[in-house]
């Protein structure tokens, strides 16, 4: 899913070019629709719903079987043990499939994914993208990635070891705050650009640009 127009891409690209004028660091902004499909989370919710339904049915079988009799015309039945088991399993299966189908809808899925799970998945995906697209790909190992995951409403800043050795992770807090402030207003491109500029300022302090510095990574936003 494309979130940004060509004009938005140019806003971010211009910010990257401007930020790298004073540093040997390389800044790579990445925007993703989502960081995971969360199929395992859906399965856990569906299994929990099915188990709960089966447990309640097993605890009060007479009540539920009376409702079944009523639906079937009001005639009381002598339910066998096997039939009770079949109704229990059938109810659990229906509940499982219903919850799985509902949570397969994105609008509900991301509501039911716990925040810690979102945070871990976004962080893990940011690390993987960084390893593929930026880690160790500059001569001085001075790459930084700004990763934004739209569905989870999460962002990450990942940097090469030579940067993290000098710059504590807390230093990126201002860049994160400025970026998210604009994004919350619906200005995604402007938010990423603000984060890029803040990262550039930090890199300029620790990794000033040399006369022989080359631009080693593309100055553009990557949508995945």
Image (cartoon, rainbow, N blue to C red):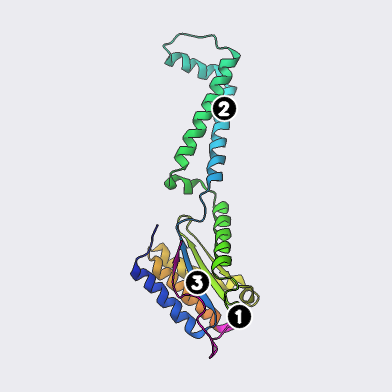
Residue topped by disc 1: 140
Taken as a whole, is the magenta stretch helix, strand or loop?
loop
- Give the answer, above or below, for where 116 lies relative to 53: below
- Which of the two discs, 3 and 2, labels the residue nearer the N terminus? 3
- Which of the two discs, 1 and 3, labels the residue nearer the N terminus? 3
Judged from the image, the secondary structure of the residue bearing numbered disc 2 is helix
- In whole angstroms, how far apart are the C-alphas of marks 3 and 2? 50 Å
Task: Identify which residue, 88 or 70, lies in the foreground.
Answer: 88
Q: How many marks?
A: 3
- In whole angstroms, how far apart are the C-alphas of marks 1 and 3? 15 Å
- Give the answer, above or below, for where 214 lies relative to 78: below
- In whole angstroms, how far apart are the C-alphas of marks 2 and 1? 60 Å
**Looking at the image, do the residues carrying marks 1 and 3 touch, with CB atoms under 8 Å apart?**
no
Task: Identify which residue, 219 or 68, lies in the foreground.
Answer: 219
Residue located farthest toward the bottom when viewing the structure as drawn: 211
What label does residue 54 carry, if any? 2
Judged from the image, the secondary structure of the residue bearing numbered disc 3 is strand
Q: Quadrant of the N terminus?
A: bottom left
Task: Identify which residue, 29 or 172, lies in the foreground.
Answer: 29
Instruction: Name the front one of labels 2 and 1.
Output: 1
- Which of the two discs, 2 and 1, labels the residue nearer the N terminus? 2
Judged from the image, the secondary structure of the residue bearing numbered disc 1 is loop
Please name the residue shown 57% across and 53% down the image. 116
Please name the residue shown 54% across and 52% down the image. 115
Q: Where in the figure is residue 32, as x and y percent of width and height?
A: 46, 60
What label does residue 75 carry, if any? none
Residue topped by disc 3: 28
Please name the residue shown 47% across and 34% down the image. 98
Q: Where in the figure is residue 206, as x and y percent of width and height?
A: 59, 82
Q: Quadrant of residue 108?
A: top left
Which segment is the magenta one? 205-224
């Amino acid at each position: 899913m494309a979130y940004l127009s060509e004009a938005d891409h140019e806003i971010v690209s211009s910010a990257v070019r401007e930020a790298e004028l004073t540093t040997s660091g390389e800044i790579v902004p990445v925007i993703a629709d989502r960081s995971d499909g969360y199929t395992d989370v859906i399965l856990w919710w569906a299994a929990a719903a099915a188990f709960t339904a089966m447990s309640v049915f097993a605890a009060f079988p007479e009540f539920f079987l009376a409702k079944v009799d009523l639906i079937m015309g009001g005639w009381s039945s002598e339910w066998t043990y096997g039939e009770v088991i079949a109704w229990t399993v059938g109810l659990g299966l229906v509940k499982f499939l219903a919850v799985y189908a509902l949570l397969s809808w994105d609008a509900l899925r991301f509501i039911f994914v716990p925040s810690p799970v979102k945070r871990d998945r976004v962080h893990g995906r940011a690390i993987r993208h960084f390893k593929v697209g930026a880690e160790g790909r500059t001569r001085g190992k001075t790459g930084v990635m700004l990763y934004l995951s739209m569905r989870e409403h999460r962002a990450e800043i990942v940097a090469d070891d030579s940067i993290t050795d000098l710059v504590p992770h807390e230093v990126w807090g201002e860049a994160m705050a400025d970026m998210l402030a604009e994004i919350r207003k619906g200005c995604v491109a402007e938010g990423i650009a603000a984060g890029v500029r803040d990262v550039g300022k930090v890199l300029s302090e620790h990794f000033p640009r040399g006369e022989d510095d080359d631009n080693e990574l593309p100055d553009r936003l990557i949508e995945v």
